Image (cartoon, rainbow, N blue to C red):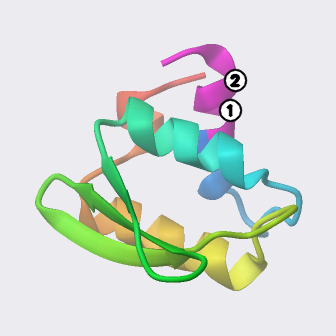
Amino acid sequence: MNHKHRKTLHALFAHPEPANLAPADVEHVLTDLGAELHERNGAKFSVTLNGHTANFHHAKHSLPKDEVRQLRKYLEDAGIDPQRDYPL
């Protein structure tokens, strides 16, 4: 995982939640983590990582804070810990 993607991953776990995460950057991070991304109906996509599946909304400019919280919870459930697995 390159440095930019590691910074994005750490930003997902930051407190307070960032309001300027680009959706494309988050999708690249998920892909680097080994997740499978599948387009769904409308502006949604499905993510499967380590046996956990979740649905998310495609944001146009930046991810809303509630989506960041939902994504953080999903990554924690999938066993991702950026401090342990991907230090800066």
Where is residue 35? Give x, y as percent: 31, 46
Whether residue 10 is visible, yes or no, is no
Judge by depth and name the residue closer to the eye, 49 or 40. Answer: 40
Residue 7: which numbered mark, if any? 1
Q: Residue at x 81, y 66 (%)?
A: 60
Whether residue 68 is visible, yes or no, is yes
Left or right: residue 36 compared with residue 51: right
Q: Residue at x 35, y 31 (%)?
A: 85
Left or right: residue 60 compared with residue 77: right
Q: Residue at x 61, y 29 (%)?
A: 5
Q: Residue at x 38, y 46 (%)?
A: 81
Residue 76: which numbered mark, if any? none
Q: Which residue is identified by label 2?
A: 4
Looking at the image, do the residues carrying marks 2 and 1 touch, with CB atoms under 8 Å apart?
yes
Which stretch appears magenta?
1-8
Q: Amino acid at mark 1?
A: Lys
Rendering quarter of residue 17: bottom right
Q: Residues within 10 Å of mark 2 (few under 14, many from 20)?
A: few
In the picture as drawn, the residue positioned furthest to the top comes out as: 2
Mark 2 and mark 1: span between their CA atoms? 5 Å
Q: Amino acid at mark 2?
A: Lys
